[in-house]
Amino acid sequence: MSEPALRPAPAPDQNRPCVTVLGAGLAGCEAALWLAGQGAAVRLVEQKPLRFSPAHKSEGFAELVCSNSLKAERPDSASGLLKAEMRLLGSRLLVAADATRVAAGGALAVDRDKFSAAVTAMVAAEPDITVEHQEQTVIAPEEGEAVIVATGPLTAGALAQEIARLTGGQSLAFYDAAAPIVTAESLDESRIFAASRYGRGEADYLNCPMNREEYERFYEALRTAERAPLHEMDGEAQKLAVYEGCMPIEVMARRGADTMRFGPLRPVGLTDPRTGHRPWANLQLRKENAEGSLYNLVGFQTNLLFGEQKRVFGLIPGLANAEYARYGVMHRNTFLNSPKLLGPDLALKEHPAIFFAGQITGFEGYMESAACGLLAARGALARLQGQTYTPPPPETMLGALTGYITAENKDFQPMGANMGILPPLAEPVRDKRARYAALASRALAAMEQWANR
């Protein structure tokens, strides 16, 4: 993929806000694009292609390294509400996602390569963004400048040491994982069927149904399969602090025989056309690209040895002869202890010109990360313009997430969008769907008022 053309920095202007954004992932690109749209001079620093993290492979910006799904779009869902709020705030990444979507039922999924290319092109076309490909080792904003650190949870090396210096070493370490991708032509079509749960949207998923015997055989093989060693944390790797939202499937299996059947292998909303009944368990495959030549094993993040992945996952009907375009991998993620370190504008309490954005703050998820970039950008611009920044109202999803990562919490863990963090309605609503719809309506009204204030 071609890199954005390097341009000279905009001419100095003491009346013009200047922001350096570190990292051209989802949060960094969203922040840089929004700031440029507000007339700020933006310096976007990205270490690729000089250096890649263990999870990144492409030279493009906004690379999706785990799933290609950006989750549900329904306005009465947490993920749908998050996206609706982001659209009110002028999200450019959602424009790119809309242009590169692939069929995924009620979810917004994208062709990851085309999505990255679209975001990279947006950045390249913006005259107020100067791109620099280099490793940043020092965070020291000049007078009248702000820095947004959006380098992600895989931040390492000298920059990680610099962040540790600035924060007193207050960070938390977790592991998360990515799911395998298989080729469509290698699937056994006689054992799979196309359908979305409850008939939502088109038949956008391929389903691998299992009867009880097939499931129990797969479960036992998975439970005892050999995992790849974790070297990054040396002795601490044995403790394996796993983030719940991206749990390896083999860890889930060890929690009980039916745990997967209430998680990624849940069979609800599906009927096996071969039997006319609901399967005992069901694996869904989601398109990785618009052509439908690659499919992602939904919910199958894993750290199994590559040979074990082929052997164990081959026990699932339809995958016996699957060819893997990418095996699942696992890597360490590091997060700030945000409740102790960050203010409501996402700036360090001890260094108010240094802002953090994305998953490194504890905003967990693709769209959450991008949304955090929008919030950090607004906080940085407010500071440079001498304005008082007020975070989104707590009734909004973004306000609730901000409140979560900045409120006192000794057991802090990353959090993604969910309806449970929103304040309850003044008048309780018993029906879940109606309650979520009412929460979303209240949130969007509050966000629209906040965005236009």
Image (cartoon, rainbow, N blue to C red):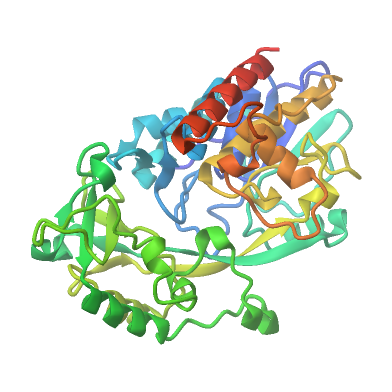
Residue 127 in sight from this viewpoint: no
Q: Nearer the viewer, residue 204 or 387?
A: 204
Residue 34 place in picture, x, y as percent: 61, 26
Mark count: 0
- 209 on left or right of 129: left
- 408 on left or right of 186: right
Residue 395 place in picture, x, y as percent: 66, 29
Q: Nearer the viewer, residue 434 or 127?
A: 434
**Does 172 appear above or below 132?**
below
Residue drawn at the location 16% of the way across and 64% of the way down = 187
Residue drawn at the location 81% of the way across and 59% of the way down = 410
Residue 336 place in picture, x, y as percent: 75, 55
Q: Nearer the viewer, residue 225 or 271?
A: 271
- 76 on left or right of 241: left
Residue 3 place in picture, x, y as percent: 48, 42
- 365 on left or right of 353: left
On the image, which quarter does residue 342 sit in?
Answer: top right
Residue drawn at the location 62% of the way across and 26% of the way down = 427
